Amino acid sequence: MDAAKRSLRHSMTTDYLIVGAGAVGLAFADTLLSEKSDVELTIIDRRAQASGDLDL
């Protein structure tokens, strides 16, 4: 098994998994953290930088 496939087998624990670092994903994360500061969230996106499909 190559390294890329092995890395997919790692596990992690999070309270919320947000898929997409665009405006909606980041707004949801902001709302969660504003209401519950003790939550652990993870944001994943296909791009290296947050902003969704916006070209900033």
Image (spheres, rainbow, N blue to C red):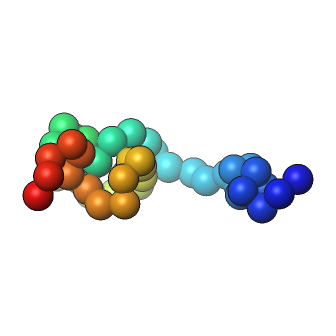
Q: Position of residue 12 (x, y in %)?
A: 61, 53
Total residue callouts? 0
Image quadrant where one finds the C terminus: bottom left
Identity of the residue drawn at 76% across and 51% down: 5
From what the image shows, is residue 20 above or below residue 4? above
Indicate left or right for 30 with 37 as reference: left
From what the image shows, is residue 7 above or below residue 52? below
Indicate left or right for 45 with 31 as reference: right
Identity of the residue drawn at 57% across and 51% down: 13
Indicate left or right for 49 with 43 as reference: left
Residue 1 can be seen in this image: yes
Query: Looking at the image, which is closer to me, 21 or 32?
Result: 21
Q: Position of residue 6 (x, y in %)?
A: 78, 55
Q: Position of residue 54 (x, y in %)?
A: 15, 47
Query: Looking at the image, which is closer to me, 34 or 4?
Result: 4
Q: Position of residue 41 (x, y in %)?
A: 39, 51
Residue 16 can be seen in this image: no
Identity of the residue drawn at 50% across and 49% down: 14
Identity of the residue drawn at 78% across and 61% down: 3
Q: Residue furthest front?
A: 55
